[in-house]
């Protein structure tokens, strides 16, 4: 058995742990040869590969990034103006691949679905720090992103407190507010703003002013995908919001945009375990010949789902999600009505 | 409404986050008065309490320990030779308590059940870093303990590597091996030993020797509850095992006993969120008048369970748990047969 | 003996450790009463104070921020249009203060000097995470800032590596590049840009292109005070530089502005020790009646210096500083000539 | 120019950063060929070496351990019953080495001195996490060890507080108490015990009892080298002390032995910078042909010292060290007289 592995899309801590688990499980259970495909689908187009044996994936469970490289934008269905599926299929045949495990976000999974239909058996492992892939309750990398954002909130708490300031932290989350929601709860934010809920500037300012009146500083956690009116404001929502809040408040308002540090560096222990589970589950599907699936997570259990599950949709925070109630019940304002 | 809150048993990071969530949710939803009972059940016996208002629990979501104090051994059913239930009930009546939320391990929960039967309404929040309470898939504090143990394994990896040593880490887990299992997977241990599986010294030594032969060092993660024969060995299983392995190996063998650092310090972001969920769920039960229950976690959902659920039993790692397969599939020896 | 303590200026981790050391040392050695002055010099103008006894400063050695509050802009020499020295002196007399220990940056120290001349005995403790106060080889808070920036670089390394990107990190350091220099060395930056040295865009781009040609990604650490031409560019030098580099390179260029997380949160162990030393040294000066001084650090020894030492000057990285040679010798480009 | 590099003795975080700096500086400045000698002096005896080029040391500044391997006990002057200097000299000649940079503790440096006298030019870089090498004010690895021990103290604070316990932490430091002293100050220990000062059990118990009387818990930081009478107690001083204190106190007493986690894992930012400075300084000596020296640190400046400087002596904490006064002034008991 010869199986290819590739990684696509943005960094998610735990990706190397997935690769390691796929490789080790396939070797141990099937004596498979595993082929690492470099730089995502580009490696399939350009036939750039290298063998992945047991040693080559030892000691990487704790490493951030991906040892296979990645690219954000290469799509074999339309690469530099042409459909490259013929090359991809030819290369897969030359390499004698029985199939490919593709680790990536919704774009990567959609391509995997298309290649599967075109005749290259694929299995998808969902990857997103934003936790916004449909069918996946909790993606690896998310816990690490939340941990990083929470640590930043912990640090901003002390500065907010010393100076009596309003401190804004912008987390990742372009389409869904999961990181901001969990980090906001964990980091004791007073206000959490999500793309799913939007916000009312007056309500936000009112909470800050109530707190000022009680000699208290305010910490706001805002997902990058929150919009402050059309068109989307260029410098980032945290800075836009800071500029709009400042005239309404006595306190100084400061914004911090956390950025890529949320997706780099070593995964948390929890993400390493989860990533290992995803990798072993993918190997299980390979061994079972259950191609054309991705690994989903439902009710805390990994299970195969159609590769199309995630396509073209985003898993948003639903209005009735229990964590929203948790936030409200512990006094967090969600940007609409004032709370004390 | 007047509700008492107490914490019993050993430290678990996240306990303050539970207290905070219980207090804030009860104040926000019911305008309740919340009374903090000091030093676990001892505070009920001695009537040592203090009010917990909104401010008194602000800013503690990230703090380790418990602001209410705790004791390991005080049982109102038999304290200093007498049954103290009459005093407890009298004090509860004097304090006009409508009920008590007890945050603690199986001992604390069993007492809560007895007090409930005796006429003091109680609700239990399960607390254990060992993750071994029946009915609770994942207890708060566990993620932090796993994170600490994993960090220690990361550090021992470098020393093991430089010196070509066998490094043993002893984690907490007297009756169940959950911490050792998850930390061992996350920390890339080569051998994981659990109380549920025991071990065969020759098999462990054989794995170490195989690795020596391949110029590789070995990291072993062992739960404190693992036994190396009867009677239980006094200095700790890691040291016992090191002493017994050393004559069988060429490499130096070193043992580290991690101890209380696993249960102190700030909770991980994930534990803070989970603890907040437990606290809000406990407040929900109070509001619903659903006394005599504890909060369980099943299929990733919090739900009420009888307080007796956890009594006298331990949630062990079952022989068919998927993480055991994950460990084996990624080349971890579980102490029985040799693996390469 | 009655001594006031105040904190001014921006946050520096370790400030609470200084307060604690001043208070404890003065109580232990002189049985002094110590008075905490709230919100920097504003508390002296408005006579807002509170007693600081042994218990009130216990357990704060590890806390970020300052328990006394602070303000950035209040100057008793010119507050809301008036000279407030008369009120300050009157309040000091009413409070029976024998003197004031002022913990702050060059602004705070300059005011302390003026108040000293006006008749209120003062002692200064220099505080800056930028490490740019004249007479002070190493200020408390600096080590923590470097640690935070280094951690961010560690995280950007993995993302840079996976994507083959150019990653830019902007550290604090408006006038001096100490944080960028030490963090850049510690974090393995390929290019370090300092206000003292400036940079040549073509040289920076050439280094990136050389690295691209060798299939290597590039990490750049840039101090916020670096200028890219006049007038200063509004969105921050990292973003400006990213925008100017991008057209010259094949790789994607990404910028991260670290911001206030560098100055919040718990101090490193090293900063806690250093801050304790500063605090005890300030108490020594108080006991010796050596008013009008600040604590300097020269050749690794704390010593009293005139309060005027720091006034109106900035301690910049000298062109012949050994760390610049260290950086060059380990292959770091400092933004002028290309290096491989 | 061909230069060998080796690492001896116990792990110290920062060792890889030294290797990297030596290699890069020698390549950059002299175009030198650098040869890595494996497993300390054993690699010289057995002629096991590998080239170290620019790429092979890239990206290791943050890695713990040593990429060259190490051994604790091999001495070419007496290895398996014979003097191996002839083999060492012959291998050095075959390899055309102009000299060797030896990174290690006092044992490694003493051997380097002997080999230098025997005709193999050597330069020593002092390495010890204990900070106890004569001539070296601050060795790389020490800051990391202090940081780890401080983090453990932070964690034990919360457990001590919740349970009203006496918590004992045993740090490394067989002959000198530097780690215990700095970590104890940084971690807010109430009692610090050093080999240099010894302790009086009654005084220690009296401090604990005073604190019990005031409803306060106690944290004790003890260096492993502290003795509790002759002969040295087998299970470690923390456990011995806990057993002896327990009968004298009401509180529970718990001991934690931190062990090897202090010397594994990534170095702090500060240690990475210091290690880089040591490495570049060693390369400076090589370039200057100043063989037979080690790099010392005096008054915060690196300077060459005779290789014999460190031999047979230990740098202990002097009785008049300023940090001892700092500790006492902030209320720490040093194990002799009681303090409140």
Image (cartoon, coloured by chain):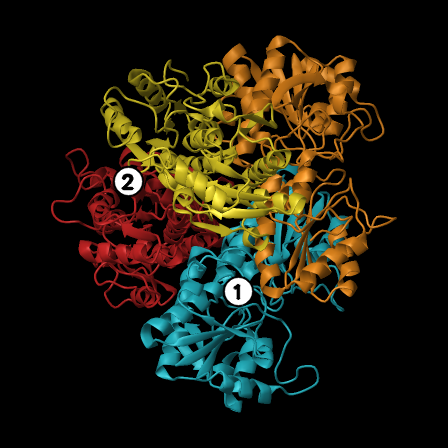
Chain colours: A yellow, B orange, C red, D cyan
Disc 2 element? helix
Q: Which residue is mark 1?
A: D66
Foreground of the two, D16 or B123: D16
Callout count: 2
Q: Which residue is mark 2?
A: C41
Say whether residue D306 is left or right of residue C334: right
Q: Residue furthest left?
A: C230
Residue A116 point in image, percent of width and height: 49, 31
Determine whether A213 is above or below B131 in the image. Answer: above
Determine whether B203 is above or below A104 in the image. Answer: below
Foreground of the two, B249 or D244: B249
Mark 1 falls within which chain?
D
Say whether residue D218 is left or right of residue A165: right
What residue lies at 36% left-to-right and 26% top-to-bottom? A215
Q: CA distance from mark 2 to mark 1?
A: 51 Å
Quadrant location of the C terminus of chain C in the rendered image: bottom left
Q: Nearer the viewer, mark 2 or mark 1?
A: 1
User: Is residue D334 visible from the viewing direction of this image?
Assistant: yes
What residue lies at 78% left-to-right and 42% top-to-bottom? B197
Determine whether D160 is above or below A334 in the image. Answer: below
Residue C301 point in image, percent of width and height: 38, 65
Disc 1 element? loop
């Amino acid at each position: 058995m010869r199986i290819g592995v590739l990684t696509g899309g943005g960094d998610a801590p735990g990706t190397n742990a997935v690769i390691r688990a796929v490789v080790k499980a396939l070797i141990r259970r099937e004596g498979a040869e595993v082929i690492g495909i470099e730089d995502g689908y580009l490696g399939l187009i350009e036939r750039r590969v290298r063998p992945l044996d047991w040693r080559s994936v030892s000691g990487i469970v704790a490493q951030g990034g991906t040892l296979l490289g990645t690219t954000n934008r290469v799509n074999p269905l339309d690469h530099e103006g042409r459909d490259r599926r013929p090359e991809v299929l030819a290369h897969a045949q030359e390499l004698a691949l029985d199939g490919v495990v593709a680790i990536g976000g919704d774009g990567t999974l959609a391509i995997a679905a298309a290649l599967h239909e075109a005749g290259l058996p694929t299995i998808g492992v969902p990857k997103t720090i934003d936790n916004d892939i449909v069918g996946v309750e909790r993606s690896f990398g998310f816990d690490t992103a939340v941990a990083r954002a929470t640590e930043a909130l912990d640090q901003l708490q002390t500065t907010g407190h010393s100076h009596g300031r309003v401190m804004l932290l912008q987390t990742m989350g372009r389409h869904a507010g999961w990181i901001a929601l969990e980090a906001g709860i964990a980091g004791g934010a007073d206000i959490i703003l999500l793309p799913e809920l939007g916000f009312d500037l007056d309500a936000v300012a009112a909470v800050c002013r109530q707190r000022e009146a009680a000699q208290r500083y305010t910490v706001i956690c805002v997902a990058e995908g929150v919009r402050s009116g059309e068109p989307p404001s260029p410098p980032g929502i945290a800075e836009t919001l800071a500029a709009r809040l400042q005239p309404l408040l006595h306190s100084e308002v400061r914004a911090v945009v956390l950025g890529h540090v949320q997706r780099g560096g070593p995964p948390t222990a929890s993400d390493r375990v989860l990533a290992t589970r995803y990798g072993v589950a993918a190997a299980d599907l390979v061994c079972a010949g259950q191609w054309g699936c991705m690994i989903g997570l439902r009710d805390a259990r990994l299970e195969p789902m159609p590769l199309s599950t995630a396509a073209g949709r985003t898993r948003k925070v639903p209005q009735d999600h229990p964590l929203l109630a948790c936030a409200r019940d512990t006094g967090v304002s969600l940007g609409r009505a004032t709370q004390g």
